[in-house]
Image (cartoon, rainbow, N blue to C red):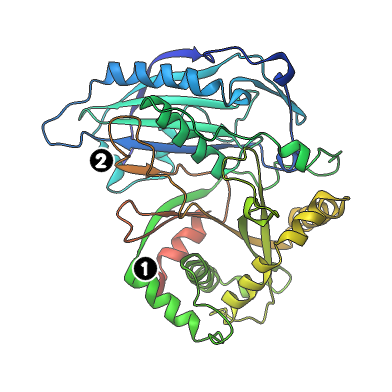
Amino acid sequence: MEIAVEITSRETVKPSSPTPAHLRHYQLSFLDQISPPVYNPSVLFYTPQNEGDQFNVDVISSKLKASLSCILAHFYPLAGRLKGNVSVECDDEGVPYSEAIVKCRVSDVTENPDPTELRKLVPFALDAINETTLGVQFNRFDCGGIAVGICMSHKISDGLSAVTFVKMWAAVCRGEEIVAPPQFASAELFPPKNISGYEPSIGITSDNIAAKRFIFKTDKIETLKARYSKEMDLDQNRTPSRVEALSAFIWSRFARSTRVYSEPNKTCVVLHAVNLRTKFDPPLPPHSFGNFYRVAMTFLPMDSGEECYGLVAKMRETLSRIDKGYVEKLREGDGHLNFIKRTAEVFLKGKLLTMNFTSLCRFPVYESDFGWGNPTWFGSPALPFQNLVVFVDTKSGDGVEAYISLKVEDMAALESDEEFMEF
């Protein structure tokens, strides 16, 4: 359904204490530089835990602002302003905080969510990134429920950094101390480079894009895992993971329904975002702030067929290459920069058909209790990309939500695919 939202107030929340002089210039890392200039959005919905209870939304909003001010003293780049693709000036300008009235019930949004409509519940247009690195929108619903909409600049943080920030903010709002403060070492680990000749905004588009959420229940996922297990030597390999099985299934049905293999002049690539923190030796802690991800690129031969036999094994092999040695090479020389420049050239010539998968599964998205309970639902507004799939665990843990963004005609074709819709 279409959501009617009215902004009722705007203000700026500043850190509770000034950023020390020696921390006021925050250098972007190489991985920050090549990350797309978009906002990573999320919406956390809350409803009273007991029937008949009511939120005191004015008190809640005041607590959110006070705790945001406190947490910004620890996450000081989020109160600063981006200066080009180079740095953040941590001058404590603060975070835009808006309040809005949403003219419907929380359940009207969460029971059959439209990822494009969810954009109305966050403070910024996702592809209109500017110097501001963080924004918050506090949404009040007719039913008394609330939603906290957050936009964090992808130029300084990846998905795990954003989720970690919200979890720490919630802990401060509950009155807890920060046990493990964020670590800001990304530019030391991946020093910035001259990336001229590479445009990080490649692929950003909202034109002719349809975004929908699909739910895959655990029993259906197990069926897919069993199907793809038959293609693998399980004496040598573990059973396909949920993300592997769903990625193979979604790609194969997309390929079948849109007939991608009828275009022999195109190269098909399946991409998976990979968290690099665990690939360091020793591993970096999860509260390492910044963009610590890269994408594993699985190139598919045009003769792989519509059912894409062997795709799980191919994806796993590609993912396995992102290891300690990969991280060491990434930190040295210009090999990776030259590779993404060449890939971008092929993409811009229309010779590359990609599908991007990113997973928030097992991320603590439902552990953001600000003092009034964990979220009723975590919503992921549609990002401005084509052929993108975002996986999120269901709240109940009985399946996986897949947010899929495709060209309008490709989404229609996928939804006409009987096998896809069976699952």
Task: Check disc 2 and report the residue beneath it.
Answer: 108
Outermost residue toward the left in this view: 52
Considering the numbered disc 2 on the image, is that residue within a helix, a strand or a loop? helix
177, 167: nearer the viewer = 177
Q: Position of residue 71 (x, y in %)?
A: 50, 24
Q: From the top left corner, tell me how far across and down residue 401 is, in percent.
A: 40, 56
Q: Does residue 206 appear in the picture of this structure?
A: no
Point 38% across, 74% down: residue: 222
Q: Label 1: how many residues lie within 10 Å, few (<14), some (14-19) or many (20+)? A: few
Quarter-of-image position of residue 313: bottom right
Q: Which mark is residue 421?
A: 1
Question: In percent of the image, x 49 and y 67: which residue is there?
Answer: 250
Name the amino acid type tagged 1: Met
Question: Which residue occupies the foreground of this view, 163 or 198?
Answer: 163
Q: Where residue 99 is drawn, which disc sits there?
A: none
To which quarter of the image does residue 301 belong? bottom right
The residue closer to the viewer here, 383 or 298, is 298
Which residue is depicted at the point 88% across and 50% down?
A: 333
Task: Assign a secondary structure to mark 1.
Answer: helix
Q: Tell me the residue at 40%/67% (across/down).
A: 416
**Residue 340 percent coordinates (x, y):** 78, 53
Q: Quadrant of the N terminus?
A: top left
